[in-house]
Amino acid sequence: NAHPRLAQVMPSLVRHLHDFAREVNLTVAEWTAAVDMINECGKMSDDRRNETQLLCDIIGLESLVDEITSKMLATSMSETPSAILGPFYRQDAPLLSNGDSIVNLSPSVSWYEQAIADSAFLTGRVVSGRSGMPIKGAVVDVWHTAPNGLYEQQDESQPDMNMRGRFATDADGRYSLYALRPVAYPIPDDGPAGRLLAMLDRHPYRPGHIHFIVSASGFRTLTTQVFDDRDEYITNDSVFAVKDELVVKFKPRDGDSKALWTLEYDFVLGSQ
Ligand code: DHB
Ligand code: FE
């Protein structure tokens, strides 16, 4: 067989789908509604919106696949756990210098005050899980929403690539940047995924989180998120991505006019 993995996966997929249909007595009308829904997801998706992924996420599928993949690939217990990529990553975020800010603040935006109150200095080291040694030249690609709960590509009031940046670690493996404490926000709920949540009496909120992709040559690229422990949705994420080790505590920061909070967080990478 030219496609051994497919030959393994498809019979199992078909068996489980058939079992599911039999178990719930799935009708033609219900199956048609599901096909329509998936088609609608596809039609609504583009560079800025991935509704099919969102649909997978609210049933926990992306988190499950992330969990399975990380368990298969982990080389050491101490590695920082992964978390889902989510639909709002953009490649080619600005390459910034350590100590730079990813926040483009104009006093005219409605969320200006919130941004000052949540201003945060983020720092930490990228280290090898195998040796514990710092990794120089690792790239920390970071993104999160503005205080209005929107990623830059969802929001015309933000400049292109706002709240995104890439930082290379120094000789001590350290990255540092200014960002914000993240806020909780609803996943886009004006499409099929949101309708399904509503029909299931589920809320669309994700706890405030910051996304990271940490990469370094010779190491497995880490896609993860950290979650602010102040958040009420931490135990109730609409897409099931929270892991205990990824819940972080921001500490008050003294003597820095640019930030009221500090987060120190190290990333431990597995070997390739
Ligand atoms: C999803 C993930 C995110 O990180 C986010 O900000 C919104 C939605 C998701 O998994 O669908
Ligand atoms: Fe997100």
Image (spheres, rainbow, N blue to C red):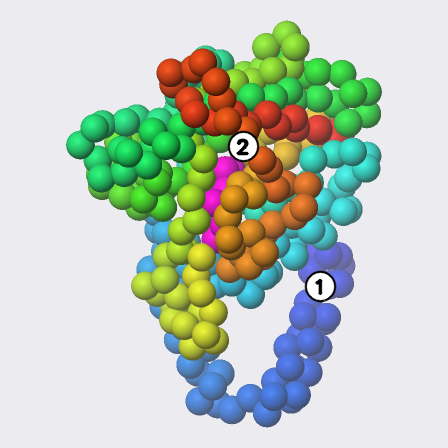
Q: Is residue 138 left or right of residue 116?
A: right
Q: Could you classify mark 1 by the number of other residues whose Cα lies within 10 Å: few (under 14), some (14-19), or many (20 or more)?
A: few
47 and 110: which is toward the camera: 110
For the C terminus, give its image quadrant: top right
Where on the picture, by quarter, is residue 150?
top left
Residue that mark 2 sits on:
250
Disc 1 versus disc 2: nearer the observer: 2
Residue 166 visible in the shown view: no
Give the residue at x 43% y 15%. Answer: 256
Give the residue at x 72% y 70%. Answer: 12
SS at mark 2 in the image: loop
Reply yes or no: does residue 254 show up in magenta. Answer: no
Please give the label number shown on residue 9: 1
Check disc 2 and give the amino acid type: Phe
Coordinates of residue 149 in the picture (x, y in percent):
36, 46
Give the residue at x 51% y 91%. Answer: 27
Coordinates of residue 251 in the picture (x, y in percent):
54, 29
Coordinates of residue 180 in the picture (x, y in percent):
42, 31
Residues in magenta, as a range: 206-211
Q: How far apart are labels 1 and 2 at the CA level? A: 43 Å
Check disc 1 and give the amino acid type: Val
Q: Is residue 255 left or right of residue 214?
A: left
Whether the residue under disc 1 has CB within 8 Å of ligand 1:
no
Residue 19 visible in the shown view: yes
